[in-house]
Amino acid sequence: MAIIHRTTLTPTKLELLTPWLPTQPWYLGADREPVLSKAGGFRLDDPQGEVGIEFMVVTDESGDQPVSYHVPLSYRGAALEGAEGALIGTSEHGVLGKRWIYDGTQDPVLVAQLLELLQGRTEPQAQSLTDTPDPSVTVHVGGAAVTTGLVSTTVANGPDGTRLTVAAAASAPDRPSALHVARVLLPAASPADASPANTSGHVTAGWRSPDGGEHRAVFAALGTTGS
């Protein structure tokens, strides 16, 4: 169970994300510096209690229209070996001390727990409350494409988001799974629009726009590499 501490983080997550976002291929702001605010998200628990896992939504208001981004984050008490390219930055936590903050799509603990969520084997948690499930996050399970025992992942970032090819210990070796993580969040016009085809599971969640509007979209979807 992740414990949410009411304390400071210096620099803040938004301060770390401001220079990081423009370096990503899915960022729509070209050469503009983002003007960011928190807009929503949820958390998952690490069964070992070591890694913080957050699926954060930030809204950038630097352009003509606000754009909301989905940024999975992992928080660690020590550097993750071999993940230097995924490091967003370090920050001093008022209770836990120095924290290493990573792009979670490249953290094996976050990826493993996201796969568990997409297969209905773990429960989404409220973003800012301890031991509190978040019923607003909905998981649609269509089949078990990946079993337990994550072995490896490859990560590809592009303008349409982040695509991970994941292999697991008990998966068919010729049918690895494809995990697509949405980055630019586009509000679904209807519940049907939030149901991607050819997937074995997807998760939808909500966020708030600067004008107070409530929106929902698919945050991540699981399929096979051939789907």
Image (spheres, grey):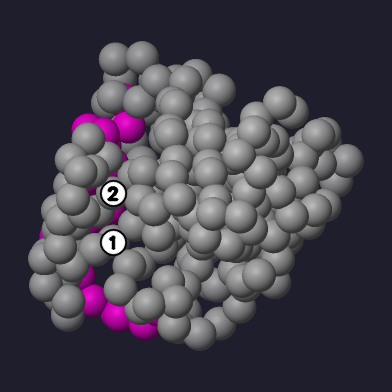
- Total residue callouts: 2
Query: Magenta stretch?
Result: 2-22
Residue 86 visible in this rendered orientation of the protein: yes
Q: Is residue 210 visible?
A: no
- Secondary element under disc 1, as helix, strand or loop, is strand
Q: Residue at x 28, y 49 (%)?
A: 102
**Residue 120 drawn above or below residue 31:** below
Q: Is residue 1 left or right of residue 95?
A: right
The residue wearing badge 1 is: 75
Give the number of the disc on residue 102.
Answer: 2
Q: Quadrant of the N terminus?
A: bottom left
Ranked by sequence position, the earlier of labels 1 and 2 is 1
Q: Quadrant of the C terminus?
A: top right
Please name the amino acid that badge 2 sits on. Tyr
The answer for how far apart the CA atoms under marks 1 and 2 are is: 7 Å
As rendered, which of 199 and 165 lies closer to the eye? 165
Q: Is residue 127 left or right of residue 81?
A: right
